[in-house]
Amino acid sequence: MSRATSTRSFKACIRCKALLSQDTQKCPICGSVEFTNEWSGMVIVVDPEKSDVAKLLGIKTPGRYALKVGL
Ligand SMILES: [Zn+2]
């Protein structure tokens, strides 16, 4: 519970849900330039091939992702 504040240092890509640092101009995963600070739940995908969560979210690239993006 105590780590909730640190998550705000990330913004989420609207298209692929990747979590990126606030100074990122362009999503390195899908190339989108649209981001939101309205996201919840962080999932770290190390091996998309073996991760059930990654399959569920349609994630194919290792990285940090939001479970939910938008309001
Ligand atoms: Zn993206």
Image (tube, helix red, strand yellow):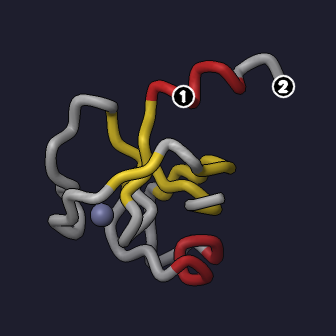
Viewer-closest of 51 and 16? 16
Q: Kindly identify the residue that appears in the image at 23 percent across and 30 percent down.
A: 23
Q: Secondary structure at mark 1?
A: helix
Quadrant of the image occupied by residue 62: bottom left
Q: Kindly identify the residue that appears in the image at 61 percent across and 82 percent down.
A: 56
> What amino acid type is highlighted by mark number 1?
Arg
**Disc 1 to disc 2, C-alpha distance:** 14 Å
Which residue is tagged 2?
A: 1
46 in relation to 5, above or below: below
Determine whether label 1 and label 2 are within 8 Å by CB: no
Instruction: Confirm or reject: label 1 Cβ below 8 Å from ligand 1.
Output: no
From the viewer's perspective, is 69 left or right of 1? Answer: left
Viewer-closest of 64 and 19? 19
Q: Nearer the viewer, mark 1 or mark 2?
A: 1
Quadrant in the picture for the C terminus: bottom right
Question: Quick one: label 2, few (<14), some, or many (20+) residues within 10 Å?
Answer: few
From the viewer's perspective, is 52 left or right of 63? Answer: right
Quadrant in the picture for the N terminus: top right
Viewer-closest of 4 and 54? 4
Q: Quadrant of ligand 1?
A: bottom left
Residue at the far right in the pictured view: 1
Give coordinates of residue 29: x percent, y percent.
23, 63
From the viewer's perspective, is 40 left or right of 55? Answer: right
Q: Secondary structure at mark 2?
A: loop
Residue at the far front in the pictured view: 71
> What amino acid type is highlighted by mark number 2?
Met
Give coordinates of residue 34: x percent, y percent.
29, 58
Give coordinates of residue 38: x percent, y percent.
57, 48
Counting labels gives: 2
Q: Which mark is residue 8?
A: 1
Quadrant of the image occupied by residue 53: bottom right
